[in-house]
Amino acid sequence: MTGSQIFSQFLSGVSRGMILFFISSGLTLIFGVMNILNFAHASFWLVGAYFTWTFWKIFYSPAFGLWISIPLAALTMAGIGWIIEVILIRRVYERSLPEQLLLTYALVLVIGDVIKLTWGVEDRIVTRPKGMDGFINIFGAPFPTYYIFVIGLGGFVAWGLWWLLHKTKFGRTVRASVFSREMVGALGIPVHRIYAGVFALSLFIAGLAGGVQAPISSITLGMDMSIIVECFAVVVIGGFGSLPGALVGSLIVGLVYAFAILIIPKMALVLIFVVTAIVLIVRPWGLFGTPMRA
Amino acid sequence: MLKLVVFRSYGWLILAVAASIVLPMVVGVFWVHVLTEILIMGLFATSFNLLFGYMGQLSFGQAAYYGIGAYTTALMITKASIPLPICMITSILLAGICALIFGYFCVRLIGIYFAILTMAFGQLVFYIIFQWYGFTGGDNGIQGIPVPLLLQDPYVYYYFTLAVVIAALIVMWFIINSPFGYTMRAIRDNSNRTRFIGINIRQYMLINFVISGMFAGLAGSLWAPFNRSIAPDLANWGHSGIPVFMAVIGGPLGFFGPLVGSVVYTFLSAFVTGFTEYWPIIIGIIIILIVLFLPGGILGTLQQKTQPAEINNSKKETG
């Protein structure tokens, strides 16, 4: 393997990691703030991808279509997120962990069929926008231009989330309500609205990720089922509820996968779960989590 | 009076056993298949409930042991034509060994970490089965599993399954109502206090994990010759969700809850898939409604409704 091959494999690992980060950042945010593990998060991601396809068909334009569709899909998902939080998630904050898991797991099934009913069973394809459909040479190895955009957007989202949580009033309130929900409520801040906002924000990012994913591979039913377990791996490795953890975990999972698929293709996915199991056994709270916040 | 009490507590049970013996004689072959499925999935769900209902930990990787059982039996029959009873015993043992290895790590964790670690190990098993084309057939699965001549008739296979499942349930019933079973409940209700009275809770949890895995393996080994074809999806995490559903529908706190759940789930599934392919959305909505409005499951809610009457009755009897 030459140096340039290694480098291009490294970049494709990073771009895969970025998609994982988009989804797992929302997953970890919901868990960190509301203490709910959202099984359905990748399903929302898939819905975002389908919405992107729909908008992309409506605004059919090779140059701009995608740039309009992605934000629209993300906004739609944010709206759906707000509604789902109010109708369903809000009712189970006080419930036991298995009940919360079951509710979101049942959502996976419902969303899967809603997708089937709305968009049918055929694969949907979105082409890469003009100017991003080619390859660029990086140290002599061709690399898809679009992946550069994915990596850039991933970095931007990571920075944006950090900024939102640490530099804005909304973010400070969110962090305060992680610390003490009652206290924040006692100060007259409508905590339920903050929670709905966090859920909507997480789904916004999931929608964004779905939009970004759409031109990478064809959109297929059942994609959510396989990626959600990888996102769990990410969140476990990085630590539940930790955003830097989600970023590092995504990169680890993305890179492990990218290199394992070159060396031992059959064991690539197995390897990810071996890593996850080892992290859980040695350090259950992950690389960035705080011990035993169960 | 005593007879009445016995009938009141075991009447439903006697009725259920009688129904399970008589029903196949009056319904068609299709429903005999459904009944067999109810039994096998009921066993699977009850094995899961040893962890969920009695140990208080949610396993999301129970399908791994079920899959190991199904694959062991299927591979032994198709590749070496080994008699079914030996296949079943081997399936139970192999599932138990895997549960011992995985469980050794899983019982160190609780709550969400337990759920995810069991799931990670489950996915490990799934991807190994999925990728190992040379041995397991990969995503093609195994088709045309030969069934012993004696059991080829679906009615006979039903009664065979019924006998095995009832035997397994009786064993589990004794385990649950032994001192060991009560120790599990103590660990579920307060693990710290249980530790303080000198009980090695990890060891107890591990034993329970292995028992649960073995019964899941038995359920899997019943499934392979029944369905005559298996696929790696039997070990995937989606399949681990089914016993969770069944336990929640029926109610995880009673021994028969998962069985009731299996009856409801499997019957509904057979009924609904008869006229629409959109079964997941229906079961999904049912689960959401049960989580929101019937937190104790069907049996739990029924018990709550009938409990005051029963307490009054027992007072009268003792007085």
Image (tube, coloured by chain):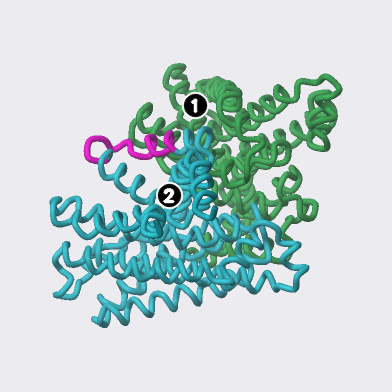
Question: How dense is the environment of label 2, judged by Cα within 10 Å: few (below 14), some, or many (20 and up)?
Answer: many
Residue located farthest toward the front when viewing the structure as drawn: B319
Q: What colour do you see for chain B?
A: cyan
Q: Chain of mark 2?
A: B
**Amino acid carrying mark 2 in the image:** Met
Q: Nearest the camera: B51 or A53?
A: B51
Numbered range of the magenta stretch: B273-286
Q: Which mark is residue A52?
A: 1
Q: Which mark is residue B246?
A: 2
Quadrant (top left, top right, bottom left, bottom right) of the N terminus of chain A:
bottom right
Q: Nearest the camera: B31 or B134?
A: B31
Q: Name which quarter of the figure residue A77 lies in.
A: top right
- On whether residue B170 falls in the magenta region, the answer is no
**SS for dot 2:** helix
On screen, A46 above or below A293?
Answer: above
Marks 1/2: CA distance?
A: 36 Å
On screen, A180 above or below A18?
Answer: above
Q: Nearest the camera: A7 or B136?
A: B136
Mark in front: 1 vs 2: 2
**Amino acid carrying mark 1 in the image:** Thr
Q: Chain of mark 1?
A: A
Q: Point out residue B19 in the picture as x, y percentages from the top left corner.
A: 24, 54
Residue B171, visible in the rendered structure: yes
